[in-house]
């Protein structure tokens, strides 16, 4: 898990060709102008989902993890809290869904909270359990982009 600010995006180019593509997209795109929906960046290697929703309580949010993609969860507007916990310490809530590359976990582990605001991002790798959508203080409507980066 990595937590950082837009000014340091270039530091993550070295994580691989697909991360370089993702960093280029995040740096060269007017993120505030994006409408919610899916964006093809480099086929199935790198794509993104632009999301807008109202944040929810920690108990309502779900831990999740992926096997084949890393997430770059990048806040465009608003504030939300990301929660991180190593996947190996979480209890599965349901079976892995290969079509969506996701598995959900129960909320028994508190994890580490990371309050995120505009131009801050977290990179969650396949070994990283994470919760998103969680309020940061009080509920608010946020806008973010989740860049999915294929790692295998």
Image: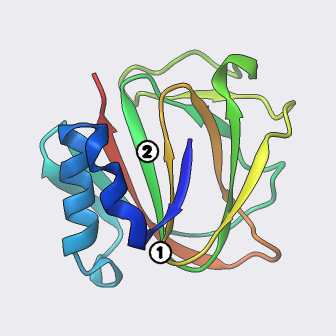
The quadrant of the image that shows the N terminus is: top right
Q: For the image shown, how many numbered marks are present on the structure? A: 2
Mark 1 vs mark 2, foreground winner is: 1
In terms of depth relative to the viewer, which is nearer, 35 or 113?
A: 113
Q: Which x, y percent locates residue 84? A: 68, 42
State left or right for residue 55 relative to residue 38: right
User: From the viewer's perspective, is residue 67 above or below residue 8?
Assistant: above
Q: Tag 2 or tag 1, which sits nearer the N-term?
A: 2
Judging by the rendered image, the residue that carries numbered circle 2 is 71
User: From the viewer's perspective, is residue 3 above or below residue 150?
Assistant: below
User: From the viewer's perspective, is residue 85 above or below residue 29?
Assistant: above
Q: Which x, y percent locates residue 64? A: 60, 34
Image quarter of residue 87: top right
Badge 2: few (under 14), some or many (20 or more) residues near its Cα, within 10 Å? many
Badge 1: few (under 14), some or many (20 or more) residues near its Cα, within 10 Å? some
Q: Which x, y percent locates residue 90? A: 74, 22
Q: CA distance from mark 1 to mark 2?
A: 15 Å
The answer to whether the residue labelled 1 contacts the one labelled 2, judged by CB atoms less than 8 Å apart, is no
Circle on res. 119 = 1
- Protein image colouring: rainbow
- SS at mark 1 in the image: loop
The quadrant of the image that shows the C terminus is: top left
- In the image, what residue occupies the spot 35% across and 83% down? 32
- In the image, what residue occupies the spot 41% across and 37% down? 70
State left or right for residue 72 relative to residue 116: left
- SS at mark 2 in the image: strand
- In the image, what residue occupies the spot 82% across and 35% down? 107
State left or right for residue 149 relative to residue 89: left
- In the image, what residue occupies the spot 16% across and 53% down? 41
Circle on res. 49 = none
């Amino acid at each position: 898990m990595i937590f950082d600010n837009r000014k340091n995006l270039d530091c993550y180019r070295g994580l691989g060709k697909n991360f370089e593509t993702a960093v280029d997209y995040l740096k060269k795109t007017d993120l505030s102008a994006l409408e919610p929906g899916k964006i093809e960046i480099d086929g199935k290697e790198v794509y993104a989902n632009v999301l807008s929703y109202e944040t929810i309580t920690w108990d309502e949010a779900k831990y999740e993890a992926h096997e084949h993609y890393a997430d770059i969860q990048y806040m465009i507007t608003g504030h939300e809290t990301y929660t991180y916990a190593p996947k190996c310490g979480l209890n599965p809530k349901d079976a892995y869904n290969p079509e969506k590359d996701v598995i959900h976990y129960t909320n028994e582990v508190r994890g580490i909270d990371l309050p995120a605001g505009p131009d801050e991002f977290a990179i969650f790798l396949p070994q990283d359990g994470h919760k998103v959508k969680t309020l940061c203080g009080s509920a608010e409507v946020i806008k973010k982009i989740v860049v999915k980066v294929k790692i295998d």
